[in-house]
Image (cartoon, rainbow, N blue to C red):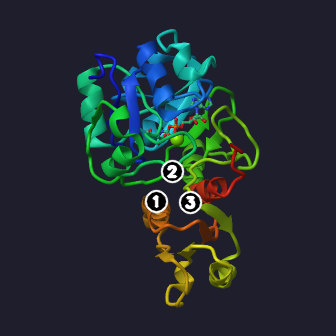
């Protein structure tokens, strides 16, 4: 299917991707069309092993080598200088390219038998919640995707951490499955994480990862009262109930009790948002976790789910 220019949804450890042959500009163009994503938003090239890195990029700094060695296969994406093999269609016209080796047996089997790079954004419509099961992919994309490889639910549940490794000092463009603390421990220096409210790179709009329901963030101790008030005012309210309040009865449309473990929270996050949409909620009240470890990525996605929506 990939060789014929088709689109194949594939499981990764983070979220499901919508894959195409990275060297086939027409297939890459179809990804943008199917997702409804502006063509200026760059894609990630997925490789079967780290040895292929130099076939796709140029000038790999020592820090990037170190990170690739330590974290691949895994939820880390490195932005490096584009090699000539990467079509500009895949990079949104940029002279840099994002690359990663995913840690999922099905993805790795596909990549190794294909033998080349697969560009894959998350397999959702532009701006909406990323899919973490094959059913989510089918619900999002239906017949628009030629083949869905079902590899079960994704283990990590939030997207890869994106590190800009083009300069002397690597920086985090998107927090994700590899924690900032783990990166800093390997690099031996501290990393800058840009504020989520600023548009830093193409494809990083404030509203993203958003369910249909509007998401409102409040302090943890206000979640219950704000949710009940909104329900009384006529909203169909879904609640992300902080684990500290797990036993509180809440009179709203639907309740998700947030797992105390950040790994379990990350794994469940996108499914929870989808479930609350399914329950007919028009408003979701949630609070932010402590922003360390995986909590940083979870908070980033929640902020952006709550971000201003484009007016249609
Ligand atoms: O976990 C993941 O990274 C998943 C799985 C499928 O691998 N993929 C994913 O792809 O999240 P996508 O397209 O939804 O998000 C990739 C983001 C883009 O939105 C863009 O912000 C950033 O990667 N990106 C890609 N190429 C870039 C580049 N050359 N410079 C800066 N940012 C880049
Ligand atoms: Mg995405």
Q: Going 54% across and 68% down the picture, which residue do you hit?
A: 281
| Location of mark 1 (residue) | 274
Work out whether mark 2 precedes mark 3 in sequence or the reverse, and give the earlier one.
Answer: 2
Position in image of residue 147 (x %, y %): 28, 33
Q: Secondary structure at mark 3?
A: loop
Work out whether mark 3 precedes mark 1 in sequence or the reverse, and give the earlier one.
Answer: 1
Mark 1 beta carbon near ligand 2 (under 8 Å) = no
| Location of mark 3 (residue) | 293
Q: Secondary structure at mark 1?
A: helix
**Alpha carbon separation for disc pair 2 and 1:** 8 Å
Does residue 80 sit above or below 151 in this rendering? above
- Answer whether residue 60 is visible to the viewer in this image: no
Marking on residue 129: 2
* Horizontal side of residue 204 vs 212, given as left or right: right
Q: Secondary structure at mark 2?
A: loop
- Answer whether residue 167 is visible to the viewer in this image: yes
Q: Find ligand 1 in the image and state its quadrant.
A: top right
Q: Are marks 2 and 1 in contact (CB under 8 Å)?
A: yes
């Amino acid at each position: 299917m990939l060789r014929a220019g088709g689109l194949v949804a594939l499981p990764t450890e983070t979220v499901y991707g919508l894959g195409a042959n990275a060297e086939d500009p027409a297939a890459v163009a179809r990804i943008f069309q199917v997702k409804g994503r502006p063509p200026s938003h760059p894609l990630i090239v997925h490789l079967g092993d780290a040895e292929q890195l130099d076939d796709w990029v140029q000038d790999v700094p020592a820090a990037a080598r170190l990170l690739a060695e330590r974290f691949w296969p895994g939820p880390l994406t490195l932005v490096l200088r584009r090699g000539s093999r990467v079509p500009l269609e895949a990079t949104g016209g940029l002279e840099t390219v994002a690359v990663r080796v995913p840690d999922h047996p099905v993805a790795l089997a596909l990549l190794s038998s294909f033998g080349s790079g697969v560009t894959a954004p998350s397999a959702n419509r532009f701006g909406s919640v990323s899919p973490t099961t094959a059913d989510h992919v089918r619900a999002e994309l239906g017949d628009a995707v030629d083949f869905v490889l079902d590899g079960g639910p994704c283990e990590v549940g939030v997207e890869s951490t994106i590190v800009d490794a083009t300069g002397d000092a690597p920086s985090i463009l998107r927090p994700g499955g590899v924690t900032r603390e783990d990166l800093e421990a390997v690099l031996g220096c501290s990393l800058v994480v840009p504020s989520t409210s600023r548009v830093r790179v193409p494809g990083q709009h404030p509203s993203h990862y958003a369910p249909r329901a509007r998401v409102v963030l409040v302090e943890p101790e206000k979640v219950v009262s704000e949710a009940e008030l909104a329900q009384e005012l006529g909203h169909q309210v879904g609640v992300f109930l902080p684990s500290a309040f797990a036993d509180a009865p809440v009179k709203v449309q639907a309740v998700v009790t947030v797992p105390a473990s950040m790994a379990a929270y990350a794994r469940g996050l996108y499914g929870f948002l989808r479930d609350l949409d399914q329950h007919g909620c028009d408003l979701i009240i949630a609070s932010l976790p402590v922003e360390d470890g995986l909590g940083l990525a979870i908070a980033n996605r929640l902020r952006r789910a709550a971000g201003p929506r484009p007016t249609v």
